[in-house]
Image (cartoon, rainbow, N blue to C red):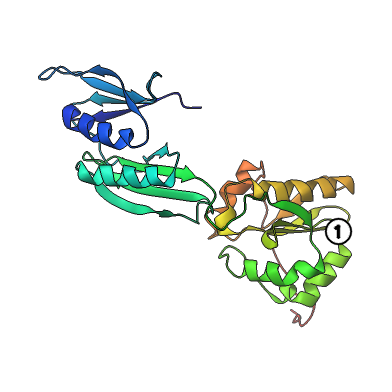
């Protein structure tokens, strides 16, 4: 876990004025100061009142500014604090990089604003509070049943990384569930279906299809929970390993599977053959 961060800035005095206002809107203050105009090596630290620094600004000869991939997010206690952060940044030389608002791609409760400080550092303030009109329910993982098929198909059609074929017609899916009872699961939040996993086996190896989580519910452990349920069910039936397929142009899927300790079988090639209509040769 990170203890504190340091940013290099060229104009230390200007940066201190900016962060005084911006971090002040989130309840942070200067907790130490080493500002000596005209001297090098000046610095200032920010943190909660009476605490240590969580962010330090340090004077450098040339600020790196907009470093690819660098992004600092500050927690905000309320939506109003997010809005105050954004307003303070713009009033003190910062640039807008995303107005205050809900970010459902990051989560239904994700309210954030994005700015760029005068030296090019990308900053964010985020409040994770329940969105008005949404209950504070916890999704539950239950067995995938035929009654879940319409909602599951609707979810799959919204996710680019999932390919659908004749095997995903309702009758075919119902047959799959009958053949593999207790191996497939869905995640539900209240009455809404927000995640799925189809799983079966041939008596030797398992095969996973359509592990999917609604975009607004990701990064909350739902994918892992669905996978854990399916793997436990396979193991209970004596299946020691399972396989899965990911489209080559799916940029997010492989990263998830590597985090689950899945191994890419680069020594193998996947071949498919139709059961009917094959020409001789």
* Quarter of the image with the C terminus in it: bottom right
Q: Is residue 117 above or below residue 135?
A: above
Q: Is residue 270 above or below residue 3?
A: below
- In x, y percent, where is residue 280? 76, 81
Query: Does residue 160 appear to the left or right of 16 in the view shown?
Result: right
Q: Is residue 45 above or below residue 204?
A: above
Mark 1, Cα crowd under 10 Å, few <14 / some 14-19 / many 20+, is few
- In x, y percent, where is residue 279? 74, 82
Q: Does the rendering let one see residue 129?
A: yes
Total label count?
A: 1
- In x, y percent, where is residue 240? 83, 45
Q: Nearer the viewer, residue 161 or 26?
A: 26
Which residue: 87% across, 60% down?
181
Which residue: 79% across, 69% down?
147
Disc 1 secondary structure class: loop
Query: Does residue 86 appear to the left or right of 245 in the view shown?
Result: left
The quarter of the picture where residue 32 lies is top left
Q: Is residue 217 above or below residue 38?
A: below
The quarter of the picture where residue 101 lies is bottom left
Q: Nearer the viewer, residue 237 or 93?
A: 93
- In x, y percent, where is residue 173? 78, 70
Residue denoted by label 1: 202
């Amino acid at each position: 876990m990170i203890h504190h961060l340091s940013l290099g800035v060229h104009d230390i005095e200007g940066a201190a004025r900016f962060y005084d206002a911006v971090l002040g809107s989130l309840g942070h203050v200067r907790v130490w100061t080493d500002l000596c105009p005209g001297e090098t090596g000046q610095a200032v630290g920010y943190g909660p009142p009476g605490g240590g620094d969580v962010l330090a600004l340090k004077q450098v000869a040339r600020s790196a500014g907009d470093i690819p991939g660098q992004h600092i997010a500050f927690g905000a206690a309320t939506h109003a604090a997010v809005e105050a952060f954004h307003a303070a940044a713009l009033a003190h030389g910062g640039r807008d990089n995303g107005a205050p608002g809900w970010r459902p791609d990051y989560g239904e409760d994700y309210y954030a604003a994005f700015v760029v400080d005068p030296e090019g550092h990308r900053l964010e303030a985020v409040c994770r509070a329940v969105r008005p009109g949404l209950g504070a329910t916890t999704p539950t993982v239950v067995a995938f049943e035929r009654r879940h098929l319409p909602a599951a198909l609707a979810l799959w059609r919204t996710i680019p990384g999932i390919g659908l074929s004749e095997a995903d017609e309702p009758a075919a899916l119902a047959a799959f569930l009958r053949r593999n009872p207790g191996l497939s699961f869905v995640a539900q939040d209240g009455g809404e279906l927000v995640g799925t996993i189809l799983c079966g086996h041939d008596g030797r190896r398992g095969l996973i299809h359509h592990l999917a989580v609604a975009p607004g519910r990701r990064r909350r452990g739902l994918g892992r929970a669905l996978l854990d349920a399916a793997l436990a069910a396979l193991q209970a039936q004596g299946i020691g390993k399972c396989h899965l397929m990911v489209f080559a142009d799916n940029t997010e899927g492989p990263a998830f599977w590597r985090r689950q300790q899945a191994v890419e079988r680069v020594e193998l090639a996947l071949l498919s053959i139709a059961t009917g209509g094959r020409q001789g040769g």
